[in-house]
Image (cartoon, helix red, strand yellow):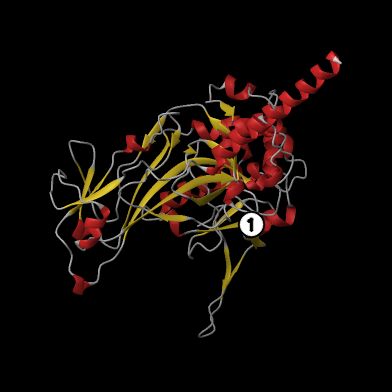
Amino acid sequence: MWHPNILQVFAVSSFPGTYAVVAHDDLAPYDEFLECRRPSAIVTVFFYACWKMDRELADEYSLGLDPEYDPDLATHWVRRSTGRLCLDLGSSHIHEPALYSFRLQISAHLANKNLNDPDLEPKALQYLSIDQFHDICWLELLEPTYLGIPVDWEVSLGAVMCVPSDGLQNAVEIAALSGNDLASSRWMCAHVRGETMGTGWTRFNCADIQGRKISLSVYYDGGSTRYSWLSQANYIFKCTGVTSSFHNYGFVEEIFFEVDVSSLLPEDGIPTGYLFLCPFGHFMTGTDSNTFRWPPRPWFWSRDAAGRSPLSSEEAATQGFPSITLSTELEGYACDASVYAGLREFHAAKGFDPESQELAIQFDYPLFELSRASRVDRNHASCVGDSHFAEVPEVRDSGGLDLHTLETPAVSVSFEFATIIELVKLGLMLFALMSSLVS
């Protein structure tokens, strides 16, 4: 078997008990190859694009020789001499880039061309489309992160949040997506399927879910929101005065609401009854189609299969039903300054102002709107630090039958309070000016 993107064996060890293979050329893990060169974000994206093409060519060749070939069992290497991807078909995937599937149609004559050319950036700008650049940035360069937040928080899907080093109490939403193309999952529990009732509530048998977690998520339907963020990130940073600590900022793509059902001891027995979980629509705040929070009554236990006789939390505890803990988790994406610099340069090379919404409008992407915190010019001073959007510890809160006592989210309160202070200051200044004119 010979192919430029498949590892070529030079020799194998025949000494008893020694297992070694010598391959042609000098191979390196892909991340080590990138680290040695430290290319710009544009060149890094171009590497991934060419490696994706290498992978497709090698897979096509291998499948032609062996219909039982499994691409998932190949290990990815890079030839130092050419910079091209090289697959080891006979080992586990130790050094494997994601190389996710995406729309990629770059010129075929680039296949197997040497990527050690020091002047690759013009080629990347020439051969990669905007959608291709965004796809690879999202899948290979942005970091998926998960952030647990208090259950009394109201949070916007599609928000751009800053989570500073001193924790969630100073988290700031600086912008949010204005689109409403939303979708939600049903209540999901591993190996257990709940039954959706005529009322929209979902019913689970107590015996099936004790010691398990049940979750529901809300997300944008389709991938255009990713393009929205990448095409408008530098615009948002310019409008809000963000010039550093970009790793503290994340785009919220999905919100998870989770119900954790405690375990019961066998000797305690499992009561006969059902857990009812509210419909997705109850999580919508009503003030904004993109804003969600736990409703006042998200769940209840009942011995009645139709749920006509809900038990209070005290009654459920007395009758031996498991306790319930609620939690909220955000899935977001963050990256460092080099990626935003690459986006700025790439957009400008394609003829768009990278610090405007021009590209998003041209491609009909959903637009971001600045949040109130941005309009009062807090400068996000608290967001400067060494933390990362993913490094804030998860916060969980115990649930109950009635959540009416939950307080308004601290973030929203700080926005309104800051606005009032600014108005008071302005009024005092006008009063002083009028007094001086009268005198």
The residue at the point 76 percent across, 21 percent down is 431
Q: Which residue is mark 1?
A: 31
Please report the residue visible at 44 percent of the width from the left and 33 percent of the height from the top.
222
Looking at the image, the residue that sits furthest to the bottom is 16
Is residue 217 at least partly visible in the picture?
yes
Label 1: state its secondary structure.
helix
Residue 198 at what x, y percent from top left? 17, 36
Residue 282 spot, x, y in % from top left: 33, 36
314, above or below 352, in the image: below
Residue 244 in picture, x, y percent from top left: 73, 43
Query: What residue sits 67% from the left and 59% below the top?
Result: 32
| Residue at far front of view | 439
Figure check: 391 above or below 376: below
Nearest to the observer: residue 64 or residue 257: 257
Q: Quadrant of the C terminus?
A: top right
- Residue flagged by tag 1: what amino acid is it? Asp
Asked where in the image residue 391 lies, by quadrant, the reply is: bottom right
The answer to which of 15 and 153 lies nearer the viewer is: 153
Would residue 250 appear left or right of 339 to someone viewing this image? left
Image position, residue 153 (x, y; %):
47, 44
